[in-house]
Structure formats: C-alpha cells, structure tokens
Image (cartoon, helix red, strand yellow):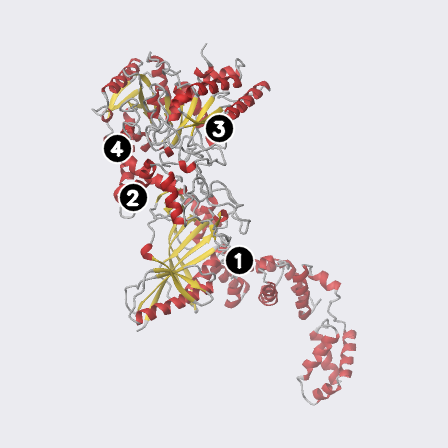
Amino acid sequence: MAAWHEKTAHEISSAVRGKQVSAVEVATSFLDRIAAVDGNVDAYTQVWPEYALAQAQAVDAKIARGEDPGILSGAPIGIKEVICTEQGYTTCSSKILEGYQSPYDATIIKKLAAAGAVFLGKLNMDEFAMGSSTENSAIKTTKNPWNLKCVPGGSSGGSAAAVSADMCTISLGSDTGGSIRQPACLCGCVGVKPTYGRVSRFGLVAFASSLDQIGPFSKDVEDAALALNVLCGKDPMDATSADLPVPDFTQALTGDIKGLRLGMPKQCFTEALGAEMREKVMAAIEVLKKQGAEVVEVSLPALDYALAVYYIICTAEASANLARFDGVRYGFRHPEAKDVREMYVKTKSAAFGPEVQRRIMLGTYVLSSGYYDAYYLKAQKVRRLIKEDFDRAFTQCDAIVTPTSPTPAFEFGSKTADPLEMYLSDIYTIATNLATLPGLSLPCGLCASGLPAGVQFMTKPFDESTLLRVAHCYEKNSGITLGKPPIA
Amino acid sequence: MEYEAVIGMEVHVEINTHSKIFCACSTAFNAPANTNVCPICLGMPGVLPVLNREMVNKSVAAGLALNCTISRWSKMDRKNYFYPDMAKNYQISQYDLPLCYKGRLDIEVDGQVKSIGITRAHMEEDTARNTHTLGGGISGVDFNRSGVPLLEIVTEPDLRSAQDAYAYLTTLKQILQYLDVSDCNMEEGSLRAEANISVHPKGSKEFGTKTEVKNVASFSGVAKAIEFEIARQIEVLESGGKISQETRGWDANRGITFSQRSKESAHDYRYFPEPDLMPIVVDEAWEQRIRKSLPELPLAKKRRFKEQYGLSDYDATVLTSTRAMADYLEAAVQAGADAKKAANWIMGDLQALLTDAKQEIQECKVPPAGLAEMIQLIESGTISGKIGKDVLVEMFASGKGPKAIVEEKGLVQITDEGALVAIVRKVLADNPQQVEQFKAGKDRVIGFLVGQVMKASRGKANPEKVNEILRKELSA
C-alpha cells in the first residue's frame, strides 16, 4: 500500500472519517516526508510539527466523539507565505516582514480549519508574489522536484513543489497573473485560479488587488473540487467577493463532455510556443475530442497587449499596496534613520528585493500626474477589450484551451538577468486574471527532459464546474500518469 | 484701489456613525490611545475595507439637505502619500466621482439671503493622530481616529467676506446637526474648516492667487483669519508684491496667519480607483428612502413656528437654531404649554440657566413637560410669575417637578383676601412716609409698597390682588 503522504485529500479524508487511519498517523507520515526530502526541495519556509499534530489530535477527538470534522478531515495542507495565519509567521518571503506574526487568520484559513484540515506550515514564494520562478524569495531557493537544477515556477513555487513532492495533499497559492497555474504546470500538479471574487481575499497580503485570487494546488482534479468547495463563497470581510451560490463542485466531475465546445485561441498557438509544449497540448485536445468535445477556433485579438496591460495595472496597484511596509508599525525598520523620510527610504531600500523595487517604481510612474492617462487609464481600457474578447469567444465555446507555459521548467539563473524574458513565462496565464476568469492547469505528460508539461483551461466567470468537468474528463481519459518525481 | 475678496471653503465633518467607515471599530472620541483599533484600521497586511452603509446613508442625507445631486454611480479612490498617521500610506477617498455634487446652501448675512454653491461632498477616511509630546525624541501615533468617516464638503468660490464664511459655517453646522449626521464639534475635531482666499481689484473678472488657511479652532477664528488674510493680501499687492500660492496656519494668540507649506512642493497623490471596494450605486429608490426620512430643516421649521405658534421672526430664529431647542419647545407645547409663554421661558430664564451651567438644552434636568406644568401653575394662579422663576431654578438644580417644589417650600400664592389685607395694613403702618407721599399725589410710590408687600409675603402674594387691596386701603 502507498504511504499516506502519497495519497490525495479525498482518500485521506474518507479513511480518517472511516477510522481506517488516524489524522495523527497521516500528519506524522507527511511530517516524516518533509523531514526526508525538503532538505533537497526547500519548499517549506516553516514547518509546524507540534501544531500539525495538535490539529490532527483534535480531528481524531471529534471522530471519537462521533462528530464529523468536515470534508477535509485530517488532510494535511501547506500554506503560501502570503496568506495570513496566527500560527507562525507571515513574511511574504520578504525581509521587510521577517518575523512578522499576523494577529488574525485569513478567512480561508478559518474555513479550511472548520473543514478538518491540518496545517503543516508555510511555503516559499517569490517576494510578495512577484516573479515566475520563486528565485525572488528572500528566504530560500525552492527547487523543482522533477529536476533540482530547475525552478519550480512562481510565484507559488513552494506550494507547487510541496504537492509535487508529496509534502502535503493540497497547498494554497495565490494567482495574480499565473502564479498558481504556471508553477503547477512546471511541477506537474493541478492548480486552479478561481474566478475573481469567488474566494475571499481577506488575509491574502495584497499584490494587485483587482487580479489576486487564492486557489489550490492538488494531485488530482477531485481534490481541487474538494478544496474549492471549502474555499469558495461570499465573505462579508471582502467587498469584492461574490454573493453567489457555491455548487458542490465534486458533482461536476461526471466524465461526460459530449457536445462541449472547446475553443482554441489562435493567438496562443503561434511560434512563441515551444514545439514540445505544442505537441503535448495538441495531444490533450485530441483526447478531449475523442470524448465528444467539439473543437472550435476562437480569436482573442487584444491578447497581444495582455502582458503590457498586466504590468501597468499590477505594478500600479502594487505601488499602493506595498506602501504600508514602511517600518512604522510592524516588520523591518532600518535602525540608522535620522528622521521619518530617511526611515522610509532606508527601510524600503534595504528590505525590498530588486524585483519588488522595480515594480513599485514602475507602478508609481504609471500613476504619476501626466502619465496616468497614457498608461494606467489606457491599460484599463485595453483590459476591458481583452475581457470583451473573451466574452465574444464564450459565445462560441464553453471552455478555452491553451498551453499553461511556453516552456517546461527552466534552470536557475537562466532568466534572472532579463526581467522581460521572465515576464514572458506568464504569457498564457495573464489574460485570465485580466478578464477575471477561472483557469486551471493540469499535467499533460512529461517532456523528453523528464519535466512536466501542462495544459490550461478557462471558462466563463463563476463557471468553475465546467472547468473542473473538462479537466477531470481529460485526467480520466488521457492515459497519462506522470509517476513520481525522481527525488528520495 | 478697491479690492474684492473671493473665498471658498473646504469643510471636513466626521460623520457620527457608531463604527468606522471600513471596519467595526468604535468611533468614540477620547478613548485611551490605540484602543479603538483593529487590523483593518491599523493597515495590517492582508486586510480589506468594507464600506459602512450607514456612512453612505448619512452622506446622502447631508447631500440632499445641501441640495446636491446624488451620484447614481460613484466610487472610492486611493490617494497616495506617505505619513506616519496614514495606516496604509494611502487614504481611501473619492476623486473624480464624488457621492454628492452641484448643490447650494442659502445663508443669511445682514438680512440678505445669499446662495452658496456646493461643488461636491465626498466620503473619505480620517487619518490617525500623531503626537510629539511624549519626550525622548519619540513621536507617537494614536490610531483611534484612523478610519473615522469623514465627509468633505467643498464650496464654489462664492463667499466674499469673513462674515459670509461665518454665516456659511454656522448654517452648515446647524443643518448637519439637524440631520444628526455629525456633532460638528470643532474642539473635538469633528468639524475642520479650511478657507481658500484670494483678492482682486474690484471689477476685475480674473481671480487673484489664493492662499489656503488651515488649522483654525473655531468659527470666529476662521472669520478673523479670513479678515487678516484679506488685509494681508491687499497690503502685499498694494506694495507691489505678489501673493504666493501656499498653505498658511492661523496663530490665534497673535491674530496672524503664517506660511506653512508652499504649493510648489505639492504632492502628486497618484489617485486611482480603489480596487478593494465595489462602485457605490445609489438608485432612485434608495435616494427617495433617505429623502423621505429627512427631518424638517431649520428654514422650514422657522417658517412653521411663525405661522403655527405666532412667534416673531427673532423668536422663531432663536428657537430653531438647534433641533434640540425646537424639539424642546414643541414637546412643551404638546404637554399643554402656551407656545409664546413657553418660548419666553426657554429663551429667557431657561437659557440663562443653561448658559451659566454650560449645558445644552438636551442635557438639562427640566423636562419640557415640567416646564409646561410650571407655566400652568402660574396660569392657574397657584404661584406667581416671580415664584415661577425660583421654581425653575430649583427644577434646574434638582430635577424635581414644579408641584413637588411648590408644596415642599410652601410657595403657593396667597390669594386669600383676609391674609393679604393683614399684610398690606402692616406694610402701610410700617411705611408712613410713603403713605404720605402717595396721598400727596405721588402715584409711583405704589410700586415700592407692592414690593414691600411681596417681600413681607416672601413673594407668595398675588401681585394683582396686592395692587388692588393697596389702592383700596390707601383711599380708605
């Protein structure tokens, strides 16, 4: 029998609720796994063995009393550093929040705890979720479990690597321009960015407020559906969260996609896409065709501007969101400042990494008087055009399929010298956020290099059910199993 | 050369919601430092604002009372600047689409009505308060005020004098208090007024360069600061100088304005729409609901008081100056008092007592029904008007009812003929000189004699009766 740490959350939850295993045994298995392999992967920034076991004991106690701890009973979960937890630290992998303890739990942390989840610790990321390789972390360098010389993707690199290396069943990430889907693709797991407004952002340290969304990493689509059942829903603490009913997403996993219209945007299958990735994605589309999907070509003409629009809007919002890290109330404060102004300048200069500083400066620039209309306002207008492109496309199809990333995982340092080159890693994922759509990446095979490839689906806003249904159907019928990454 | 001044006002009022604009913290004033705070108003990482619906209700009410158009669709924006009193280093405010715009407020100056244009009224959050008096080179920040809801009300440059500005402020305060949307207490900072002032040669169409006067602690201070600033600007221009656009403070002790910050170093606030909040959509039904719930405003109430109660223009003005005073009068009338008599008592004796005790009418121990009862005791002849004054003093001090006081102290008016005749005869016997004078034709002496009788009766004698008996006895 496979070790507990190799199992999915739905397997673990039903075994724990069926008293086939205790939550403590499960948690112990995962803690042992972390101790065995995280020295190589460096996914976790903090591991909470005592806290995890205490939560597991509480789950076991509930079961002993005949209560149901919830649909994630005993499922061990890892949390991206950008999500606020009372337990441990919330550093956003930045020096400026070194040692910062949040006085409150994010709404989704409360929801997951109420569903019986067991939190193992926090996961590494690019500083303030800015990056596509997790190389911008001020804490450590997370490796891709499939090849330790390669990046896990980013910004949620730790979350992807931890699921991929069996160091948690489900992990939480945040996705502003692809930060869940791209690392999920590079590490060979399932990653979902729900519709903007589907999941509460209360307790997610903001990078770009109109784009940020929390979502799960998992080993299969069923776990993704299970996690979304817990994560989604209106939160009175988040004015942008949608007051819409949340269906039971596991009900969408019917395996039946007959008659589903699958849109292929021609703009996503150009020369920019690597040959191997193209081949894998086309094969995935063939699988779905065989299951009865009808493939239609759609056009998203404004997509060419997505990257430019994204880097104006996200940096503008980030420049305001990160202004609060000033050394006045919490976090790092430069010890040598003589007055307030110097405290601001020295604190921010010393404790923000170069990518964060670059984006704050970009964002400040595009909002400045005299430049606002040419940059920020124009970008908002083009964002609208991109959204309209998708609206039009969804009159012709029910789901859109694209690659998740132009290439599989790349080697450390290969893109750090050129920010633009790094930004292009998110070329296929960014538009989803700009159009507030739900998106999902799941593995579609291994490349010759032994690195995973991924395919991305998108649907209309709040139609996560269709998203999961398509992904699940592919997963069931692809005949592809990645196997386990070649680590200890 | 003759000059004309042009003044526009920017007034920040704290809206008196129970909780802050974006979180559930109390807005109470004077709590110990940093006790009315939470992660949201402290700007901790990961928090989000949620707009207080009551703030929108109260702001719409204020907008309607100021004859503004209410935006069907407006939004909040971020105003970016760094300062330790800013929890997030941006203030959530409204930039290009304020909730209320294009209104007007009628003010009365020297009996003339002037219409002052209201450019806009927008919602925003207050900042924390910095203190630099802790010693040891340390500055402190009290975040209790951080996130208290503010409405910023901006006028057109329609004011022409310090008097205009004073009238505008008092009228605005009166209306906001009537609406119960703000305490408008300048000492507690729940109303802050800034004046933009410029002067130009009379007849010229072009406005002069303006200065902005801030941090004034009272309405009369604002008026004085404007007067000073107008004179200063004229003097600068007359001596061939130029006005520099700047922010000026007011030194109340020296009675002068002084330069604080030049506009050349003005901030670029990099406003952009607040992505954490949804647009504010006030539909027709919402606006109508608030319009219907608006109380009678001062001007309408004043007109009604004149018609319904036959009060003079002056009395009606005084009695509608605050909603509490108007409510007090109406409650007294409701309890059976004659409106004019009640008005006289409120404006006279009761106001004097309130002024001495530094109390507002709503805090006073005399309930309107108590005043009405006391007036009725006079009407029915149970006590004299003079005793009534003493009874009111006692009611004000102890909170007792008038009947109880009258009984307790034996203040019932002496109307018994026999008893009064006895007192009168004794007074006449004690004052033979005055009796002689009266009989010699000095009729005015009667006043002195009445006074003596009242004194002898310790104020309880019915003065009319005393007069009557005195005349009878003297002519006997």
Q: Quadrant of residue A314?
A: top left
Q: Mark 2 lies on which chain?
A: A
The verdict on a common chain for dots 2 and 4 is yes
Q: Quadrant of residue A381?
A: top left
The verdict on a common chain for dots 1 and 3 is no
The three-letter code of the residue at mark 4 reads: Leu
Dot 4, crowdedness within 10 Å: few (<14), some or many (≥20)?
few
Q: Which chain carries label 1?
A: B
- Asked if the residue at tag 3 contacts the one at tag 1, i.e. Cβ–Cβ closer than 8 Å, the answer is no
Q: Which chain carries label 3?
A: A
Which of labels 1 and 3 is toward the front? 3
Q: Can residue A247 be seen in this view?
A: no
- Asked if the residue at tag 3 contacts the one at tag 2, i.e. Cβ–Cβ closer than 8 Å, the answer is no
Q: Distance between the residues labelled 4 and 1?
A: 65 Å
Residue B368, how many percent across, how many down?
62, 59
- Return the mark for residue A111: 3
Residue at the farthest left position? A271
- Return the mark for residue B323: 1
The verdict on a common chain for dots 4 and 3 is yes
Left or right: B367, with A456 as reference point:
right
- Return the mark for residue A420: 4
Say which element carries label 1: helix
Judging by the rendered image, the residue that carries numbered circle 2 is A365
The verdict on a common chain for dots 4 and 1 is no
Name the N-terminal-most of marks 4 and 3. 3
Which of labels 4 and 3 is toward the front? 4
Residue B120, how many percent across, how many down?
38, 53
Residue at the farthest front position? A336
